[in-house]
Each structure stands twice: as C-alpha cells, then as structure tokens.
Amino acid sequence: MFVAKKIVLLGTGGTIAGTSPVAGAGTGYTAAQIAVAELLDAVPAIREVARGGVLAEQVSQLDSKDMTHAVWLRLARHCEQHLADPEVQGIVITHGTDTLEETAWFLQSVLAPAKPVVLCSAMRPATAMTPDGPQNLLDAVVVAAEPTACGVLCVAAGEIHGAREVRKAHPLRLNAFSSGDVGPLGWVEERSVRWARDLAPVRPHESSAGQMVRGLPEADLWPQVEIVMSHAGVSHALVKALVDQGVDGIVVAATGNGTVHEELEKALEEAERSGIVVRIASRCTEGRMPGAPDARWASANGLSPVKARISLLLDLIDDDLAAAHDEGAAVE
C-alpha cells in the first residue's frame, strides 16, 4: 500500500526569490528577496503533487554568487537531518544558478543520498513578466516525490541533471544548464518523470546519509583550495602568491587533455615541494581526460575545475581528520 511522505523545501535565496522595482523586468533585479514559504504559497499545485505535505525552511537568503562554505555546511546538516526522517520522501532546495553546480556536487559528495535532493533555480526573478521559477519549483517537487529518484539532482526548464555532470552553460537562456555530452538524466513532463536512463544505484556504504556531514569541522577550519588556469602567456605570479599565502591545495584548469604551460608547471612543482597538493582538471566543457598512471599530478577524474576544487577540499579534510585520529590514538 502506497503511503504518501512529505517533501522538505529548503530555501537559500537566488534569482528564483529575486524581485525588481520595475514591474515585469527580467534584469536589474535583486536576488534573494522572497521567503521560501512565499514561493511555496505562490504555486498551489505543489501541495497537490506532494501528497504527504510540504515542510518549508529558510536555511539562508543570498545571491548564489556569494555562496560560502558556512552555508554549505548548514545546508548539508539540514539535509542530513531530514533525510534520516522516514517520513520524508525527498528534499527540494531553492538556489541561485551561478554556483548551483558546486552546491550540487558538494552535497552529493558528503551525503550520497538514497533519497532525492533536488536543486531548483530560475533565470528570471519572481517579479518578471513570465517568471520561470514557479514551473521549475513544481517540477522539482515532482522529482523529489518520484519513488525512483535518488541522489542530488538539478531540475530546470523541464530537464533533470545529475550533480556530477551539471554545469551552467549559458548566462541568459531559460535552459541554462547542461550535462555536456552525457546529456540530461531525464525530463519532467506533465507532472511525471521520464528517465533517459537508469540512475546509478547508491552503494551500500552510502545508503545512510550524513556519515561525512557529521565529521565535517566548522567551515572556518576547512583547508584553503584555489583554482588557477593554464593559458597562453601565463606566468608563475598567481601560484607564487598562493604559496606565500599558505594555501593547502591548488586545482589547475588545464588546457585540452590536462596539459599545463611550462611556466605554470615550474611554479606548481615548486608549490608541491612546499607541501601544497596539486590536482589537474580540464578547461574543456565536454569529454573526460582518460588520465595516466605516470601523470605528474592526479587528475580530477572528469570533474570540472570548480567541482575538482570541492573534491580536493574534502579529501584534505579527510586527511586532516585521519591525522588527528592517528595522533589521538598514539597519545592513548
């Protein structure tokens, strides 16, 4: 017997909650002005789709270009709490488009949820003549309520994208998100989900959400990881400045199949000798570097530079936690 479960709606701001002083304007707006509860009330059909009810919570209220590690941590903790509730079917998060792909990958990395966590956004503010937010929000709830959905997903313009592949590919159009040559996971059509392919199953050790969330330190204690780009005429200046600042890791947005300008390569070798961890990602928006066992630095395993930064950040946190554990064990 089917038992309807509730959907949790978490608000973080973004264009979907934006307003403009000019009636009907689609640009010149201020993001993160409308509470998530108001967004919910503006789309009555959401309660019809979420037959078990909807619980709305405001986690933050910001333009996603200003996303912080502290907000990520707060959001992950909220998700972990609700995912552990057997009465919750799934979670929808309203979010700005600019850093949505980063938040999606962070949440997938620390939660790997068996239930769906769906990020929802908009390219037009709520006060635009034809806002896209209401339909996107309804579609996101449809996906969150779908029994076959799992993991962290992005829903926009009727498309469903996975956290690993999704990226913002256009600054203006309504279908601004793309998964490159992999393509969408599926589509939302007339309040139902049509999958393009089966979702990857959640591995047994990932089936309980929040194992890593509970071990994360407060955000001000996280390692510092920065991104540099390899390009024609690049100098060593940026890497040298990062070394002097004492960063913990550097991700290189490399050309082509992970190639790095010789001047930058010299600077990175020096950085590595000072204890900084280096990882390579490609600037290319499609395809994946195959990697090589004898490569100078570890590749990002197909992740974009911004997502590779998140993975390196979490790896360094893991290393710090393991080192602290070993030190504590040695003292005992």
Image (tube, rainbow, N blue to C red):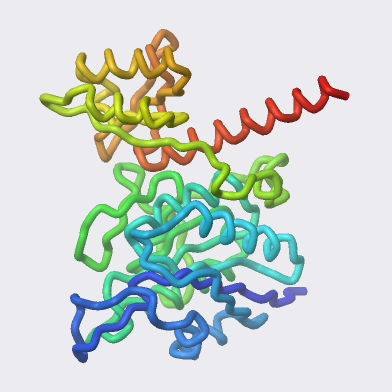
Q: Indicate whether 153 appears above or below 230.
A: below
Of 149 and 39, nearer the camera is 39
Report whether 136 appears left or right of 74.
left
Of 73 and 186, nearer the camera is 73
Q: How many marks?
A: 0
Residue at the far top: name it: 294
Report whether 216 appears left or right of 22.
right
Quadrant of the rendered image containing residue 87: bottom right
Q: Which residue is at a point 33% across and 50% down the rendered structure image?
A: 167
Quadrant of the rendered image containing residue 297: top left
Report whether 242 appears left or right of 40.
left
Q: Where in the figure is residue 144, as x and y percent of width and height?
A: 56, 67
Of 265 and 305, nearer the camera is 265
Q: Where in the figure is residue 288, as x and y percent of width and height?
A: 34, 30
Q: Which residue is at a point 47% across and 76% down the rendered structure image?
A: 191
Residue at the far front: name it: 244
Report whether 32 appears left or right of 85.
left
Q: Which residue is at a point 24% across and 20% down the rendered structure image?
A: 264
Residue at the far left: name it: 233
Residue at the far right: name it: 332
Quadrant of the rendered image containing residue 238: top left
Q: Which residue is at a point 35% across and 37% down the rendered structure image?
A: 305
Q: Where in the figure is residue 266, as x and y percent of width and height?
A: 27, 13
Quarter holding the N terminus?
A: bottom right
Quarter holding the C terminus?
A: top right
Q: Indicate whether 46 appears above or below 97.
A: below
Q: Where in the figure is residue 219, as x and y percent of width and height?
A: 56, 49
Q: Indicate whether 241 appears above or below 14.
A: above
